[in-house]
Image (cartoon, helix red, strand yellow):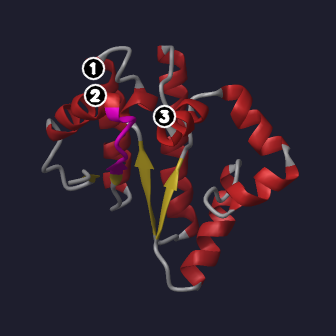
């Protein structure tokens, strides 16, 4: 019951707005979310790198409804790889296939993933596929395996 409630809350935009605007919940979330802006995430990554840790950066979100939203997510991931390279960070990027349009069109999603993976390869980096909600995991794993073996794509086991 608790798990299903938490999963439902994770999909709620109004709940997300409440968490990010409420001082107490914002402080609690900061432990897990480096920042809402790329500059904040880069600063947190730099701090972790200085402490000897590697970092995985995410562009939070999933289950986009339009191809435009998926393209926006792709563009955000491309920008994250650019910044990682510019800043010389020891970091990779983690993304969700539903955020890149898996639920809209599989071939469209593949194209967006391909562009991100190619950018990552250009920086000698990789994209880690983060598994979506359990109802989409089989589809995400099937789609991910079509890319398995690519040197810059990491899949969960």
Q: Nearer the viewer, mark 3 or mark 1?
A: 3
For the point 49% across and 25% down, the residue is 71
Cα separation between marks 3 and 1 = 27 Å
Q: Which residues are magenta?
A: 128-134
* Vertical placement of residue 4 versus 94, above or below: above
Within 10 Å of disc 3 (Cα), the crowding (few <14, some 14-19, many 20+) is few
* Vertical placement of residue 58 versus 69, above or below: below
For the point 12% across and 50% down, the residue is 149
Cα separation between marks 2 and 3 = 29 Å
The numbered mark, 3 or 1, whose residue comes first in the sequence reads: 3
The numbered mark, 2 or 3, whose residue comes first in the sequence reads: 3
Rendering coords of residue 91 (x, y %):
46, 66
* Vertical placement of residue 131 versus 157, above or below: above
Q: Nearer the viewer, mark 2 or mark 3?
A: 3
Q: Which residue is mark 1?
A: 106
Q: Secondary structure at mark 1?
A: helix
The residue furthest bottom is: 51
Instruction: Give 84 or 49, whichever is nearer the viewer.
Output: 49
Q: Which residue is mark 3?
A: 4
- Asked if marks 3 and 1 touch (Cβ < 8 Å), the reply is no
For the point 47% across and 34% down, the residue is 74
Q: Nearer the viewer, mark 2 or mark 1?
A: 1
Cα separation between marks 2 and 1 = 6 Å
Q: Which residue is mark 2?
A: 110
Q: Secondary structure at mark 3?
A: helix
The question of residue 99 being in magenta is answered with no
In the displayed structure image, the side of residue 68 where residue 43 appears, left or right? right
Instruction: Give 105 or 138, whichever is nearer the viewer.
Output: 138
């Amino acid at each position: 019951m608790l798990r299903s409630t938490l999963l439902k809350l994770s999909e709620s935009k109004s709940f997300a707005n409440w968490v990010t605007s409420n001082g107490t919940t914002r402080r609690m979330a900061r432990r897990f979310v480096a920042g809402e802006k790329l500059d904040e995430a880069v600063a947190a990554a730099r701090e972790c790198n200085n402490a000897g840790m590697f970092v995985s950066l995410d562009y939070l979100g999933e289950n986009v409804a339009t191809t435009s939203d998926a393209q926006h997510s792709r563009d955000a991931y491309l920008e994250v790889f650019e910044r990682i390279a510019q800043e010389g960070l020891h970091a990779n990027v983690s993304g969700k296939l539903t955020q890149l349009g898996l639920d809209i069109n599989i071939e469209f999603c593949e194209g967006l993933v391909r562009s991100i993976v190619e950018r990552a390869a250009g920086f000698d980096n990789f994209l880690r596929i983060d598994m979506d909600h359990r109802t989409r995991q089989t589809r995400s794993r099937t789609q991910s395996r079509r890319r398995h073996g690519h040197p810059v794509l990491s899949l969960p086991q």
